[in-house]
Image (cartoon, coloured by chain):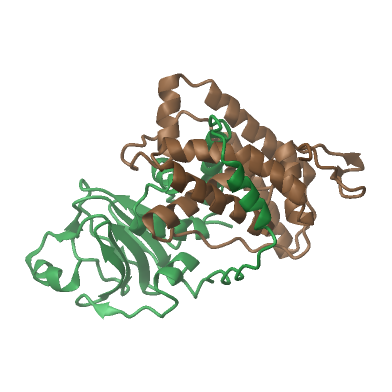
Amino acid sequence: MRPCNPVIAEGNSPVQDGQPIAYSAQTTWMLAVRDHRDKAAFACLFDHFGPRLRGMLMRSGVSAAQAEDIVQDVMLSVWRKAASFNPERADVAGWVFQIARNRKIDIIRRERRPVPEDLSEPTVDEADGEQIVALEQEAAKLRRALSALSPEQRSVVERAYMGDLTHAEIQAETGLPLGTIKSRIRLGIERLRHELKGDR
Amino acid sequence: MQSIHHHIPDSLLAAYVSGALPRPFGVVVAAHVSLCETCRAAMLAHEAAGGAILDSFEPIEVSSDLRERVLASLDDEVAPEPAPVQADGPLPAPVVEALGGRKPKWRSLGPGASQCILEHGAAGSVRLLKISPGYEVPDHSHNGLELTLVLQGAFRDVTGRYGRGDLEVADSDLEHTPIAEQGEACICLAASDAPLKFSSLIPRIFQPIFRI
């Protein structure tokens, strides 16, 4: 098995203002899958997310057999829907999370979850490396905030995002600081809108 | 550029992102997010929070069979994804999807008001309402939660003015009389988890017929 450090082909490494930019391992794997259909990079994503997805599904009461089915389904969706991954608006874990949630609802509840209209993508997309790195940093801050919660708070937050609490039970604050990551994602959405209008 | 003033409360958005929100409300949230960049960013932030939780979950090893099976399936031919549903005039994509791609069939609710029920079941109901300018939605209060999203025109009630993209969140405490503004007919997407009850006699007679 190849170790999980896919070599990015010469000329494909992200550059901003002439300086190379280092993305996180997850983003690097995901972009290699999206742009180069890199199976070794996909195997790295599988080895990272497969067992975590299984852990999350089994915590929410899904049987071991059904958890394996859903993990398979989710990871194949990661491969097949890779083109819609946009690191300027979502980090890899958040993107995998929403696929897992949709597949879980499709498979367990047998209903289609209503989803918002897709944002139209510009035909020529030059990645904004700074935006991507800044969003990765915000996601890392969220992970740190999560690990700083007391076990009780953390359990409430987990139950809220795993769908175990109703909207009435989720009180106004989950205890996670979402303000700065919201603003950062908003910048990614606005850049897209300006590109579509040809403002840039 | 955006003139949306009434947004999705954070707890509703978190419930939508978690998958716990019943489908009728989910249709309204998805329709609002389709029109509102602020709430789209907030939704993506909640998904990032879900991602942080996923990422920090204790891994449970998956069988090596599963890994091999997935890696061996990468080159399988799969049917292409259906083209995403598009908005149709004032109706955002999630509404068009709930309509099954058909045009709404309006049924009269009495003078100045008509409706088109999109879905109705144990989890609640979601419908389109069309109110002619100057007319009021019959005076009613609610048994439970009601979400009303304006898709065209505007209405006013005791809580303020609601134009395209604005979302009103009402619970059983609110007794209100929304009145459609002059201009275009006001088209709203409304979801409730209980049948609406009317405070005046006449509409109550219609209630079983119209499933209000």
Residue A25 position by quadrant: top right
Q: Which quadrant of the rendered structure holds the N terminus of chain B? A: bottom right
Horizontal side, residue B110 vs residue B97: left or right: left
- Direction from residue A167 to residue B142 in the image, left or right: left
Residue A189 seen:
no
Please give the name of the residue rendered at 45% of the width and 70% of the height, measured from the top-left corner: B97
Counting from the top left corner in percent of width and height, residue A140 is at 64, 31
In the rendered view, tell whether residue B41 sits above or below residue B3: above
Q: Whole-percent x and y of residue A114?
A: 44, 60
Picture residue at 71% right of the left edge, 48% below the top = A42
Q: Residue drawn at (33%, 42%), measured in percent from left and top?
A: A166
Nearest the camera: B145 or B52? B52
Q: Is residue B126 above or below residue B106?
A: above
- Residue at the (59%, 25%) spot, across then down: A144
Give me the chain that's brown.
A
Q: How many marks?
A: 0
Q: Position of residue B125 (x, y in %)?
A: 28, 62
- Nearest the eye: B96 or A39: A39
Q: Is A7 located above or below residue A124 in the figure?
A: above
Q: Colour of chain B?
A: green
Question: Which of the two residues, B204 or A2, is positioned nearer the viewer here?
Answer: A2
Residue A71 location, x and y as percent? 54, 47
Where does the C terminus of chain B fall, quadrant-wise? bottom left
Q: Can the viewer see residue B60 in this picture?
A: yes
